[in-house]
Amino acid sequence: MVQSTKALGAACLVLLPVVALGCRERTGAPGLVPVVAGQKVAPLDSTTPREIELSGAVVTTVEPALVQLEVNYRFSQGQPQPGSAYRCEITFPVTACQGVRLIEGWVLNAEGTIQDWFTLSDPGAKSFEFRVSVGPSLQGPFKGVSNVASGPVK
C-alpha cells in the first residue's frame, strides 16, 4: 500500500495547476484547467497564424481581495491547436498584481468563455487588462495573439 501511495503522490505532482504571479488563485476555485498526462495530441500547425478576439471582459469584486474574471474569446484566424499552450495574463494597472493561467490547446473551442478567480495581494485594484499569447508548450516561449481587453473592476 505504501508503494501505491508514493505513485499516487508522484502522479499528483504532474497535475499541479499553473502559475499566478503577484496574485494567488483561490484554492479549489472553478476554472482550473486539467492537465492530462500522456494525452495524444494532433501535430502543431505552425503555418497558420492564430488570432483571438477578446470581448465582454468583466472583472467583479467577490470579496475585498478576491476578484472574478469572465471574458469571451473567439479564434478569428486559425483554430486552437491541441499541442499548443495558451497563456492568459491579467494585470491590474497601478498595483503590483498580475495573474497568469496556462491553458492547453485541446481544452479550447473555436469560441467560448474563460472564467477565473484571483486573490489580490494588493487589494483595491480599479482597472484590469487581459491578453492571450500562444506557445509550443506550457514552458513557452509565448507570442501575443489577442487584443487587450480592459475595463474597470466592478
Image: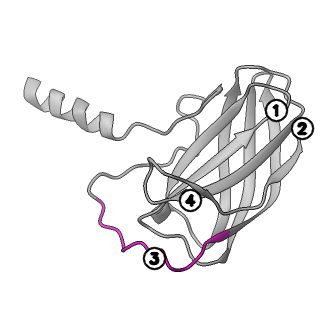
Which of labels 1 and 3 is toward the front? 3
Q: Secondary structure at mark 4?
A: strand
The span shown in magenta is 39-51
In percent of width and height, residue 154 lies at: 89, 38
Of the numbered discs 3 and 2, the one sitting upstream in the chain is 3
- Residue labelled with disc 2: 154
Q: Secondary structure at mark 1?
A: strand
Q: Residue at x 16, y 34 (%)?
A: 7
Give the alpha-carbon distance from disc 3 to disc 4, as whole Å. 12 Å
- Residue labelled with disc 4: 134
Give the alpha-carbon distance from disc 1 to disc 2, as whole Å. 6 Å
Q: Is residue 14 found left or right of 5 in the rendered image?
A: right
Of the numbered discs 1 and 3, the one sitting upstream in the chain is 3
Disc number for residue 61: 1
Three-letter code, disc 1: Thr
Q: Is residue 115 found left or right of 87 in the rendered image?
A: right
Q: Residue at x 74, y 55 (%)?
A: 71
